[in-house]
Amino acid sequence: MTDATMRSAALTDATIFFDGSVRRGRWTLKLSAVEIRAGVTAVVGANGAGKTTLGRTVAGLEALDTGRVAIGGRTVDEPATGRFVSAADRDVGVVFQDQRLFAHLRAVDNVAFGLRRRGSNVRVARNRSTELLDLVGLPPTLRTARPSELSGGQRQRVAIARALATEPEVLIADEPLASVDEVARTELRGVLARPGPTYTLVITHDPVDVATMAENVLVLDEGRVVGQGPPGEAAASITSRWAATFLGANVVSGTGRGSVVTTGTGFAVTVAEPAHGGVHLVFPAHAVTLHPDRPDSSARNCWPAVVTRVDIDGERARVGLSGPVDLRADITSGSAHDLRLRPGSAIWASLKATEITVVA
Amino acid sequence: MKAVSRPDPNPAPAALVGMGALALALLALPLFGLLQRTPWAALPGLLTGDTVVESLRVSLVVSVSATIACAGLGLPLAFVMARTRLPFPRAIRAFVMLPMVIPPVVGGTALLFALGRRGLVGQWLDSWFGIRLPFTTAGAVVAATFVALPFLVTTVEAALRQAGSDLEEAGATLGAGPWANFVHVSLPTIRPALGAGIALGWARAVGEFGATITFAGNLPGRTRTLPLQTFLALEQDPEAAVAISLMLLVVSFGILVALRSRWTPR
């Protein structure tokens, strides 16, 4: 074995390795030697990009047509050799988009289900499940409620606890926070990102999830990987318009006091809706406008910035900015030309308070 | 304050309402004919007569055994039909539904040629195991199972299809193998439908006449069930026939009402 193959084998052993295709009706998910590293990976992409199919294939709910999937060096699906480890025998927990709680079981027994199937006795399984329900913040009085008696957000908490109960090596969460309110979202992000599973795949549409949880991002478009890496790098390497827009959203964290949010660097941002305590500010890259001099406009927020990079993509230019906050601005390539932007240029940026969404 | 009666903004055509009422009358009328002829005073005596009690016992043994056989055989068939890709699905479905649509006498005749002493399978049952089904209580159970099975299979299969395999997938990711998933996920999910299928199958088994008399005969104490007793009594003792008919009718009606209120969504 050469050094190179040994290194690649060692790397592969500590990843989820996915190389192959899954046909689903009209379209095919086809990934070439994608490696998903340990930690939290956000899987993003437009509807129909293949995010859910990727998760289902790793979980063993879909079988590959060609190729190989390995988890931590162990091949779990390889049509050429006939190897297929069933979902029940893979160490993968899934939080389904539609929750899929067992209607006939109480909340605590839904969580205990996996432990019971793996041989725990009733008492041990219930105790562990009660701890997990506390962790995800289900009120104690609802432990014995049936799924039909719970709200959407409460069901989602139970679903997350259920997937974590068996302490899986891989946790796949498909839009886990879509059905919960903002306060619960912040809480549950902490639960999903806590150490436990070696690999956590969070399929999401929410830029805040990416900014707050993900160590890596995997961007899918029409069944192909179009970007991968830490959130910033993935955004820069994007070729897909959709993904660029998605990852182009700026997320800035700070502490709110009324209509002003102060970032960690001491920069004060004026917002249109009152904010209190720790918040994230989300605004699209195209909401940031650039000016050669201090603008005399109605925008409440303007500040001097330095251009770090300029990527021209047809009619559109993506500009990286550093300053009191690092962010991205999308402008037309025409104005990028007019402003003579290049790395190192000093300019002014402005942002309307009404363009900012405050997320608790 | 009392709600004011408002005109229905989307009324049904009058002609349909009229024809529908006629259909309902056709369905309900026989029940009232029976009630009108019922000898109420003599009813307790008629229903506790030796022959009636004897055929009631045969009916219970046969129908309960047939229901157990239905559940034991029908549940697996329904599951396989709903969850696996079988070859020739239409042909299989037709076979399953067949006993619902063919005259029971034809079913009984077919059973006789298949399971009779000289039948396709019956000759081997006889020569290898000494089992003879025709004109035995076991034969009556086979006949009743034959006619009742479709009710259970179709009810349970429909419920399994409607439930889909989403929950079974969730079960699999939690470590449940196929059997654990069946026992701990699928079965509890379709329990209401299974109950309904069992009740419908039992009701059909209790009422079975044609296939039973053709295949199992009409032997008092062995294969003479309540419907056979009713038919016999019609010539000798019409009042007894009315009494038994009323009893069977009340039981069937009761099952349907119970199903409506407990097992089917309103």
Image: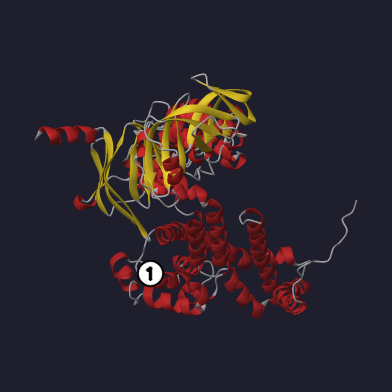
Residue A192, percent across and down?
A: 45, 31
Residue at 31%, 64% (x, y): give it.
B129
Please determine whether, in this image, residue A27 is positioned above or below residue B119. above
Q: Position of residue A148 (x, y in %)?
A: 59, 43
Q: Is residue A197 visible?
A: yes
Q: Depth check: B160 or A14 in front?
A: A14
Q: How is the image coloured?
A: secondary structure
Residue annotated with mark 1: B132
Q: Residue B37 in the image: x percent, y percent?
A: 76, 74
Left or right, A357 with respect to B95, comes to right
* Residue B183 visible to an observer of this rendering: no
Which image quadrant is residue B94 in? bottom left
Under circle 1, the secondary element is loop
Q: Is residue B133 above or below residue A51?
A: below
Residue drawn at x 90%, y 51% as measured from the top left? B1
User: In the drawing, does residue B190 fall left or right of residue B121?
Assistant: right
- Disc 1 chain ID: B
Mark 1: amino acid:
Arg
Q: Nearer the viewer, residue A240 or A91?
A: A240
Rendered residue at 29%/52% (across/down):
A21
Please tell me which residue lies in front, A329 or A235: A329
* Depicted A3 relative to depicted A27: above or below: above
Q: Residues within 10 Å of mark 1 (few under 14, many from 20)?
A: some
- Work out which residue is located at the far left of the displayed protein and give it: A1
In this picture, residue B50 sits left or right of residue A41: right
Q: Is residue A57 left or right of residue B263?
A: left
Residue B109, image quadrant: bottom left
Total marks in image: 1
Q: Quadrant of the C terminus of chain B?
A: bottom right
Q: In this view of the protein, which residue sits in the foreground, B183 or A114?
A: A114
